Amino acid sequence: MENSVRFRSDPSGLARTASALSRMTVNFEVGAGIVLLPGEEIVIQETDIGFLSCAGKIVGRMTVTNYRLLFESSEEKCTLDIPLGTINRLDKMGYSNMSRGEDSYGFEMFCKDFRTFRFSSRQENHARRPLFECLQRLAFPLSHKLPFFAFQSKEKFNSNGWLVYDPIKEYNRMGIPNTNWRISQVNRRYSMASTYPNVLCVPTLTSDEDLAKVANFRSRRRLPVCCWLHPNGHASLSRSSQPSVGVISRRNHGDEQYLQTIIGTNRKSRKLYIMDARPAMNARANKAKGGGYESEAAYPNAELVFLDIENIHVMRERQLREICVAYGEDKKFFTHLDETRWLDHVRLVLCGAARIVDKIYNYSTSVLVHCSDGWDRTSQLTSLAMLMLDPYYRTIKGFEVLIEKEWCSFGHKFAHRVGHGEDKPGDTERSPVFLQFIDCVHQLLYQFPQSFEFNSLFLISIMDHVYSCRFGTFLFNSECERWKVDVHHKTNSVWSLLNSQTEQFTNPTFNQVGGLNVLIPCCSVRRIRFWIEYYRRWNPADNSFHKMNERAKLYRQMVNVRLMLSEKMQELRKKQKNCRSVNSSTLNLEQIEKHGVETS
C-alpha cells in the first residue's frame, strides 16, 4: 500500500501504528531526495508547515506532486505519503483577519480511506493559499478539466495486467459455448446496452433479434445474461436489471418467454428463483417510476424472493468515518458502531449471497439476480455467490478476474460511487458499495482462512488503488467509457502492480488441494466481524496497522518455508519414483534369470 505515514521518533508510541506496511512505490526517507514515480512531477513545495498529528504538532516540508502529497520532518523523523485521489474534501481553517493561535490557520483534509489530516501555516508565510489552490486543482482534476494521473504515469511493469481478464477464455473455462448457452456479440461496440460488457452469454435458443426486444423491457436495457454456470452444465447464475412493469403492470411476452428459455437450459430443475436484492416496499415504490418486479402470475415456474438490502441512498460511510478517526479510547465504540448499521448491512449482503448459493448448490436450481439498475447490489450478490461456489475465484488471479468481470465489465459506476476527480463531497451518487463487497470477502476469509490464496493485505491494497487514480482499472463508470478513452493503452492496470508483489499477498495457510469446494458462511450477527485492520488502521489507539505489519512479515516467512518444504517433497517423490523403477528393473532381471535356469 502506498498510503502511508511514518514516525521514527515518537516517545508516546502513538504514531507507530501508522507506519507503512508496504512501501511499494516510493523511496521517501527523511533528509533524502524524493524518488518520484515515472511521470510524476513536483508542482509546489512549502516549508514551515505544521502537521497537527495525534502525537502533537510536527513542523516540516510539504511537497505536492501531480500524484500525491508528501510531508517530511527531519526534526521528528516523520513522513507522510498521500495520493491526491484519496482526498474527499478540503476545508480551510481560520481566516487572515482572525487570531486564535498559531495552529488555527491552515487547512483540513478528509480522505476516502477514513483518514483526516490537519495542517497549519503561519499567516505571514502566505503558504496556505498556493498550497490549498494547488491541492484543490490536482485532487479534483475533472472539476478543473485536468487529466487523471493514470494518464500521465509512465510506469513500466513486467506483466500486463490488462491481459488478466479475457471474457471468451473465462466463458470457455466454464464450458461455454455448449448446447444450452452461447457467446453473443449482440452488444458489439456497446450498441445495445452501453453499461453492459461487449461480450454476453445467452441461451442458444434465443436469437440476437429477440435479445434486443427483451432489452427494451429491462431498465437501462440490461437484459438477463448468464455470468456463471455450474460445472455439471445445468444450474446457472444470471443477472439483469428490473423489468419496466410500471404502475399498470405491463407485460412483455418476449421477456416472459426469455426467462422460460433460461429455465429450459437446466435439466435438473424446472424452476427459476428470482432474487430481488431490494426490500419489497422499495420494489413496489419503483413501479411508480416505471420499474418494478416480476409477477409470479406472468412468469410461471419462477419464484420471487426479496432480500431486503437497502439502496445506496441509505448506506453512507459518514458515521463509520467518525468512529474510525476518533482518537483515544472510545468507551461507546460498539454503541456508535451499531448506530451506523454497517455490520448489519454486511450481514444482509452475505445472507443474500448464501441463499443464492443454497439454491444453486443444494437444489440445482438456476437463479436470476437483480436490484433496480443491476450495477450495485446485483454485483455484490453475484460476485460473492461466485466466490462461494467456485474455488477458482479464491485464487489471486481468479479474484482479479471476478472483479474485472462482475464489477468493471458489468458497469459498476466506480466514478460516481467513489467520486473520482470531482469536488462534490456531498454528491448523493456516492456510496461505499464496492467497499462493502470487499468487507464481505474479508468476512469469508475470516471464516474460511484455508480456502483463499490471498490474504487481507491484498484486499486492502485493492481498496487503496480504487481511490488512488494511479491506474485505469477503476476509473469511469463502465467498460464502454473506458473503451472510448482507450484506457487499456493509455494507462496501466492495477493488476500489473499487484501481480508483481504476490509474495506479500499470499496466504500461507491456503489449502489448494484439500480445501472446501463450496463455502456457505455463517451469517449470524455473532460471526460478523468489524474489519479493524482496515477501518481503524490509521488510529493509534488500536495499534492494528503495526500488528498487521508484523503479521505480514510472519506470513512471508511462512510462505517461504512452505515453498522450501514443497520443493523438498518434490525431490523426495522423485527419488522414491526412481527407487521404485530401479527395484522394478532388478526384480524383472532376477525373474528372467530364474526363468532361464529352470528352462535349461
Image: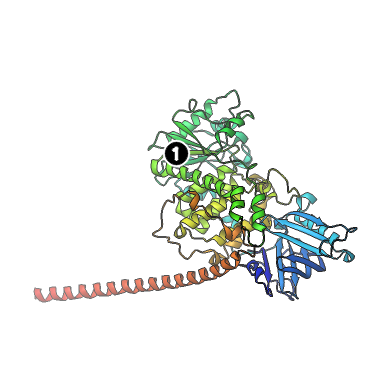
- Quarter-of-image position of residue 549: bottom right
Q: Residue at x 44, y 51 (%)?
A: 519
Query: In the rendered view, does 422 fall on the left or right side of 97?
Result: left
Query: In the rendered view, does 12 fall on the left or right side of 269?
Result: right
Of residues 79 and 411, which is closer to you in this image?
A: 79
Q: Amino acid at mark 1?
A: Ser
* Residue 135, image x, y percentages: 79, 58
- Quarter-of-image position of residue 2: bottom right
Q: Residue furthest top?
A: 248
Q: Secondary structure at mark 1?
A: strand
* Residue 82, image x, y percentages: 71, 62
On the rendered image, what quadrant is the C terminus found in? bottom left
* Residue 475, image x, y percentages: 67, 51
Q: Residue at x 41, y 53 (%)?
A: 517
Q: How is the image coloured?
A: rainbow
- Is residue 564 at least partly visible in the picture? yes
Of residues 15 and 223, which is closer to you in this image?
A: 15
Q: Is residue 346 above or below residue 567?
A: above
Q: Residue furthest front?
A: 331
On the rendered image, what quadrant is the N terminus found in? bottom right
* Residue 149, image x, y percentages: 72, 58
- Quarter-of-image position of residue 25: bottom right
- How many marks are shown on the rendered structure? 1
- Is residue 491 at least partly visible in the picture? no
Dot 1 surroundings within 10 Å: few (below 14), some, or many (20 or more)? many
Q: Is residue 69 above or below residue 242?
A: below
Query: In the rendered view, does 484 fall on the left or right side of 460?
Result: right
Which residue is tagged 1? 366
